[in-house]
Image (spheres, rainbow, N blue to C red):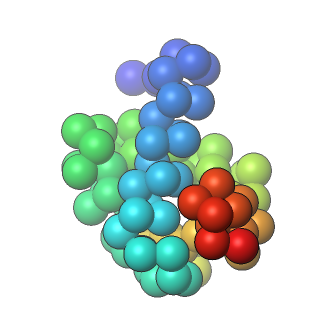
Amino acid sequence: MHLSVVAMMDNSDRYLRKLYEMSEGHMTTFDRHEIGKKLGLDDDETDEIVDELEESGKIKTPLGNTVVLSRAAKDMLDSEKGIA
């Protein structure tokens, strides 16, 4: 099942912010599906979101199912929190 573009954008933002929250602002890797499950997403939805975020340069997938924030995304989220 494919997500609608609007739902995917909303879930992509939620996913990115959850990854940032879980990493406590560090460049820490996590299992992509662990984050998706915390947001109530199934594995297929999570994979679609990860693909979109990776294509946009917001996350990287260094090994298998792991994800990590890109430096640009970390800097953007840090600045939103007033950390930069």
Q: Nearer the viewer, residue 64 or 52?
A: 52
Judge from the rendering whether residue 24 lies leftward or rightward of residue 70; answer left or right.
left
Q: Give the answer, above or below, for where 71 lies relative to 15.
A: below
User: At x 23% / y 49%, what residue is drawn?
Assistant: 37
Q: Quadrant of residue 54?
A: bottom right
Q: Nearer the viewer, residue 32 or 39?
A: 39
Q: Give the answer, above or below, for where 17 lies relative to 9.
A: below
Quadrant location of the N terminus in the rendered image: top left
Q: Quadrant of residue 62?
A: bottom right
User: At x 60% / y 20%, what residue is drawn?
Assistant: 5
Q: Quadrant of residue 35?
A: bottom left
What x and y, as percent, mark residue 50?
53, 52
User: At x 75% / y 50%, what residue is drawn?
Assistant: 56
Quadrant location of the C terminus in the rendered image: bottom right
Name of the residue lying farthest toward the front = 82
Does the rendering let one see residue 60? no
Counting every numbered tag in the picture gives 0
Q: Nearer the viewer, residue 84 or 34?
A: 84
Q: Give the answer, above or below, for where 76 lies relative to 65.
A: above
User: At x 63% / y 72%, what residue is drawn?
Assistant: 83
What x and y, as percent, mark residue 9?
58, 30
What x and y, as percent, mark residue 13?
54, 41
What x and y, as percent, mark residue 76?
71, 60
Does the rendering let one see residue 31? yes
Judge from the rendering whether residue 25 lies leftward or rightward of residue 24; answer left or right.
right
